[in-house]
Amino acid sequence: LEWMIASLDEKTRFQLLLFNDDASLILPDRGDEWFALNDRQTLKQVVGRLREIVPGGSANLERAFFRVRTLSRLPDAIVLLTDGLPTASDSFLSEGATNDEQRIRFFREAVRGLPERIPVSTILMPMSGDPAAPALFWELANRTRGALVSPARSWPEA
């Protein structure tokens, strides 16, 4: 993610949304302000916060897309960095481990909540045990005019 931020065009303004059981902005005290690359202090805060994050909990993509809809200014594009299909949903309750069928249903419900006309590009990190993920994220990319990238397990070291 740090590499992606560093690769943005200097005129790009960006915002980062983190999601697991909930969805929150990277710097919640700054509201949904969009960050500029020439604001070195903010970039330092963003990178510092990124380095503190420890993945945990479920992955509720429905909440993430809902949070996008509540931003005061909708994004021109979404880049989703994930390792697979959602494992939680607000629309469909489940207890314990979720199966493939539930995760597909969670994904489809999350996508229904996306704001219209925003390209969604997904970087699908390698993970075993999620056979439907590549096809569903490909469908999402195709439908929204986004892209799907799935880097090798050895990336970025390769």
Image: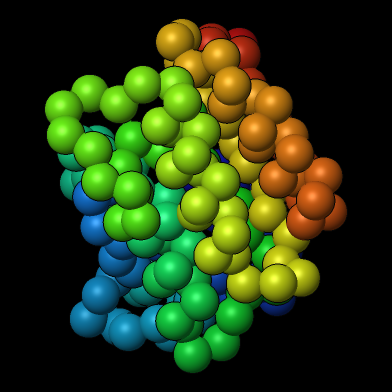
Q: Residue at x 30, y 26 (%)?
A: 98
Residue 26 in sight? no
Q: Is residue 54 left or right of residue 84?
A: left
Number of numbered discs overlaid on the protein picture: 0
Question: Horizontal and vertical percent for residue 149?
Answer: 69, 31
Q: Is residue 53 left or right of residue 31?
A: left
Nearest the viewer among 30 and 80 is: 80
Q: Quadrant of residue 47?
A: bottom left
Question: Horizontal and vertical percent for residue 96?
Answer: 16, 27
Q: Quadrant of the C terminus?
A: top right
Q: Quadrant of residue 120?
A: bottom right
Colour mode?
A: rainbow
Q: Residue at x 75, y 45 (%)?
A: 141
Q: Is residue 12 left or right of residue 142?
A: left
Nearest the viewer among 129 and 39 is: 129
Q: Residue at x 22, y 81 (%)?
A: 29
Question: Horizontal and vertical percent for residue 129?
Answer: 44, 10
Residue 53 in sight? yes
Question: Horizontal and vertical percent for residue 2?
Answer: 47, 46
Q: Answer above or below: position of 121 versus 126.
A: below
The residue most toward the bottom is 72
Q: Is residue 43 left or right of residue 38?
A: left
